[in-house]
Image: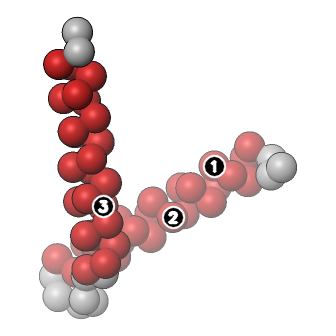
């Protein structure tokens, strides 16, 4: 198992890189990664569906 500080560093670097990549894509410097964005959208939609399903059972 990785030490917590190392894991947090990897997560932070991944987040910073992803944010930088999205920012550069906004200004046209790089092409956005369509597959990643498509995955994120599908993942977010299923996340919302789960919340709605949980609310309807209350």
Counting residues from the start of the chain, the first of labels 3 and 2 encountered is 2
Q: Which mark is residue 14?
A: 2
Q: Nearer the viewer, residue 57 or 46?
A: 57
Q: Nearer the viewer, residue 46 or 12?
A: 46
- In the picture, residue 4 is in which quadrant? top right
Counting residues from the start of the chain, the first of labels 2 and 1 encountered is 1
Query: x, y (%) of residue 11?
Result: 56, 55
Query: x, y (%) of residue 34?
Result: 25, 80
Q: Residue at x 23, y 9 (%)?
A: 58
Q: Which residue is mark 3?
A: 40
Q: CA distance from mark 3 to mark 1?
A: 21 Å
Callout in the foreground (3, 2): 3
Q: Circle 2 — which element? A: helix
Task: For residue 24, say whether it is visible.
Answer: no
Q: CA distance from mark 2 to mark 1?
A: 10 Å
Residue reaching furthest to the top:
58
Label 1 CA crowd tier, 10 Å (few <14, some 14–19, many 20+): few
Q: Are marks 3 and 1 in contact (CB under 8 Å)?
A: no
Q: Residue at x 21, y 49 (%)?
A: 45
Above or below: residue 11 compared with residue 48: below
Q: Which residue is mark 1?
A: 8
């Amino acid at each position: 198992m990785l030490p917590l500080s190392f894991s947090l560093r990897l997560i932070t670097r991944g987040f910073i890189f992803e944010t930088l990549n999205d920012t550069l894509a906004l200004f046209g410097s790089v092409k956005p990664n369509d597959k990643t964005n498509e995955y994120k959208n599908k993942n977010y939609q299923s996340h919302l569906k789960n919340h709605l399903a949980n609310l309807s059972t209350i």
